Image: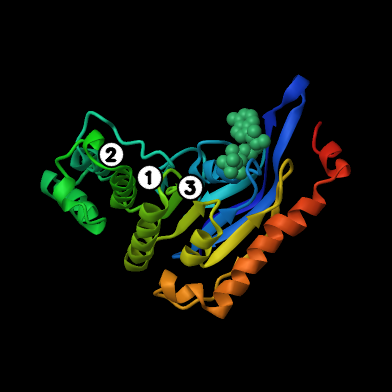
Amino acid sequence: MSTVEVRDVSIRFPGKAGKKLLALDRISLDVREGEFISLIGHSGCGKSTLLNLIAGLLKPTSGSIVCAGAPVKGPGPDRAMVFQSHALLPWMTCFQNIELAVKQVFKRSSRAEITERADAALNMVHLAHAGQNYPYEISGGMKQRVGIARALATEPRVLLMDEPFGALDALTRSSLQDELVRIVEATKSTVVMVTHDIDEAILLSDRVVMMTRGPAAHIGEIVDIELARPRDRIGLATDRKYVAYRKELLEFLYAKQDRILDRAQLSAVSV
Ligand SMILES: Nc1ncnc2c1ncn2[C@@H]1O[C@H](COP(=O)(O)OP(=O)(O)OP(=O)(O)O)[C@@H](O)[C@H]1O
C-alpha cells in the first residue's frame, strides 16, 4: 500500500524577466508504507521543492499528491518535517519543544500521556539526560536528534527530511545516520529524505530516486537497494553490491546528467 502518491506533479516559479521557471516536470512517485526513500540530484534540481510539495508547504501547478488516502492541501500532522537546521524553539527546553509538538497533535491526550510520549521520544534518540537543557546548551548533533525525536513523537504517517545531517561534521553525521537506521528499523517509519550524500542514501534507503538536472527536472532513474538489514557501514564498505550501487549512482549524477543538459532542453523550459 502507498502512503504517499505523487501524480504528474509539475511546479512553475516566477522566473527572470517575467518568465516562469518550470522547476519540476510531471513527477510521479509512490512511497510505500514503511519504505525509506532518498531523493538525490544536482544542486537546484528541485529535491527540496518536491519534499515541500509533499509537506504541503508548496502547491503544485498541476498534478496531485495524496497522503494516507487524503489529498494534500496544506501541512498536516500526517507529515512531519525535519530540516537541515534543527528549528527548535530557543526559549523552550528540549523536552518542552517535543511536548509542544505532541500537544498540538494529540489534543485529547492527558498531561501524563503527553509527558510519556515526549519522554519516549527523547529516550529513542538517547537524550533522556538532556530533556531539561535549552537548545543553546547542547551540540549541533544533539539538536538534530531532538528535531528527529520531535518529528517522530507525533507519529506521522510519513517523515520528511531535508538534508537532516547536512550541517554536521563527518563523525557526528555518521553516528546520527547509524542512529536513524536503528530508529527507522524499530519504528517502521515511512521516510522521504533529501540528501547530497550517496553513501548516506545507500546506507539508509530501500530505494534511491535520482532526479535529472533542472530546470524541468523529473525522475531519471530509481535504484532498489537490496542490501540486507540491519546494515552496518563497516561491513558495507567492502560489500560488492554496495560498491555496485555506489558506481551506479555516481555514473548517473556525474556522467549521464552532465551530458543531457543541452541548449534544446534549456530553451524548452522557459515559457
Ligand atoms: N520559492 C521559489 N521561488 C522561485 N524559485 C524557486 C523557489 N523555490 C525553488 N525555486 C527554484 O526551483 C529550483 C529547485 O530548487 P530546490 O531548492 O528545490 O533545489 P534542490 O535540488 O533542493 O537544491 P539544493 O540541493 O541546492 O538544496 C531552483 O532553480 C530554485 O531556484
Q: Are marks 3 and 1 in contact (CB under 8 Å)?
A: no
N-term-proximal mark, 1 vs 2 = 1
The residue at label 1 has a CB less than 8 Å from ligand 1: no
* Residue 49 in sight from this viewpoint: no
Side of 55 relative to 263 (left or right): left
Q: Are marks 1 and 2 in contact (CB under 8 Å)?
A: yes
Q: Nearer the viewer, residue 172 or 131?
A: 172
Q: Which residue is mark 3?
A: 163
From the image, which quarter does the C terminus lie in? top right
Q: Give neighbour class at mark 2: few <14, some 14-19, many 20+ (Cα, 10 Å).
A: few
* Residue 175 in sight from this viewpoint: yes
Which-is-in-front pick, marks 3 and 1?
Answer: 3
Q: Nearer the viewer, residue 248 or 113?
A: 248
Q: Residue furthest top?
A: 17
In the rendered image of this protein, does residue 208 appear above or below residue 259? below
Query: What percent of the width, then of the height, locates residue 168?
Result: 40, 46
Ligand 1: image quarter: top right
Q: Which residue is mark 1?
A: 77
In the rendered image of this protein, does residue 243 appear above or below residue 220? below
Which-is-in-front pick, marks 2 and 3?
Answer: 3
Side of 1 relative to 262 (left or right): left
The residue at label 2 has a CB less than 8 Å from ligand 1: no
Q: Residue furthest right?
A: 264
Query: What percent of the width, then of the height, locates residue 253?
Result: 68, 56
Q: Nearer the viewer, residue 216 or 74?
A: 216
The amino acid sitting under disc 1 is Pro
Q: Which residue is mark 2?
A: 104
Query: What percent of the width, then of the height, locates residue 232?
Result: 40, 72
